Amino acid sequence: MVSAPYSSLPALRWDLFCRVVDNLGDIGVCWRLSADLAARGQQVRLWIDQPGPLRWMAPGALEGQVPGVQVQHWHDPLSAHALADWVPGDVWVETFGCDPAAECMARLAEQLTQGGPTPVWINLEYLSAEGYVERCHRLPSLVNQDPLRGLTKWFFYPGFTGSTGGLLREPDLLARQAAFHRPAWLQSQQLPLGTARHISLFCYEPPVLGKVMQAAAQEGPGCHWLVTPGRAAQAVAALSKHPASLHPLPALTQHDFDHLLWASDLNCVRGEDSLVRALWAGQPFVWHIYPQHDNAHHAKLDAFLDWLDAPASLRHFHHQWNGMVPAAGPVWPGWGVVDGWRTCVQAARARLLAQDDLSSQLLGFVAKKR
């Protein structure tokens, strides 16, 4: 737990390193973290190899219009111009196992030979509910490659329990949620109101997507599918049959993506960042976990469902949505069942709200290590 509120901590310089692998979840997490740290008085340089998506994800980010955050295009190799006035920060955060830029490590080594300070070096890992997270969180690891051999980096694991690093949660999140006006937002996006349900679709290629769409369309007043661009839109386009009530969405800012989840009756999310935002939304959701070729994601999904205390219907739907079991018989459970999942999600949300968030824990950890 954090021993002091983040407002009492000094302003530090943070270098946060991000390599975009695929599907933009990594840049989503890294931007939210950068912006959250900056909002708490920190100075953040975000080194990222594919900064382009920030133009729509966080307008103004690339132009330096977000106070406290400077985005650096991480070219390989970094030019002398990029490092002309750069001094290694007080804190280094390498995200998702990426090493910092080689040129930055060389500059730090030079600084250390001149008696300069050593940054607190953090390896911010992937999110998981598996047991190893609590065991490995905050463990040290010696750097074994030159020119910084012998320095210590610290594993920092986001997670769902009090023995992990917590989840990203901005201090104003609950206030923004309380002030959110669903009809006004739907109208601002030219999306329909009325009695039909709204389902947000942000997914990979669920094998049962067609069956779910057809069955949900036939129940009660029907539903509107709010389809995000990219792989979700491509998955819908590949179906031979789909309901008529499809609403393709533009690329949304991170704040508007939150609004989408708050406005929907069921959220289909994927990856890491949107899972966390679905938990904060408190609405029923299904998580399309990132598939791995050796099916290691099956255990990861079940560990999350165990933590969630998911009822049997929600667990089974997750297994079908992720292709872990054959889709035998009806897949869509009906809105009566789906609405019942809200109790489970909101209980999990309440547990998370009682824990320290990721940024607060990082700030407290860094303060102790300095």
Image (spheres, rainbow, N blue to C red):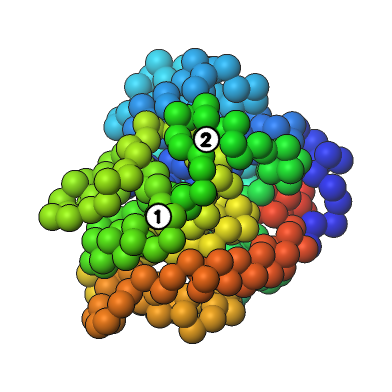
The answer to whether residue 28 is left or right of residue 353 is left
Which-is-in-front pick, marks 1 and 2?
Answer: 1
Query: Is residue 64 shown above or below 7?
Result: above
Q: Give the amino acid at mark 1.
A: Gly
| Disc 1 crowd, CA 10 A, few/some/many (<14, 14-19, 20+) | some
Instruction: Find residue 43 and report its horizontal and vertical position in percent.
Output: 65, 29
Of labels 1 and 2, earlier in sequence is: 2
User: Would residue 301 be seen by someone viewing this image from the given angle?
Assistant: no
User: Where is residue 82 drawn, in percent x and y?
Assistant: 42, 20
Q: Which residue is mark 1?
A: 222
* CA separation in Å, label 1 and label 2: 17 Å
Q: Secondary structure at mark 1?
A: loop
Viewer-proximal residue among 176 and 117: 176
Q: Nearer the viewer, residue 220 or 208?
A: 220
Q: Tell me the quarter of the picture where residue 36 sits.
A: top right
Say left or right for 173 vs 121: right
The answer to whether residue 339 of the structure is visible from this angle is: yes
For the point 49% across and 84% down, the residue is: 312
Q: Looking at numbered disc 2 in the image, what kind of residue is underneath it?
A: Leu
Q: Is residue 232 left or right of residue 41?
A: left
- Which disc number belongs to residue 240? none
- Figure check: 106 above or below 125: above
Give the labeled residue for mark 2: 186
- Whether pointer 1 and pointer 2 mark residues with C-beta atoms closer than 8 Å, the reply is no
Quadrant location of the N terminus in the rendered image: bottom right
* Residue at image point 86% right, 51% down: 4
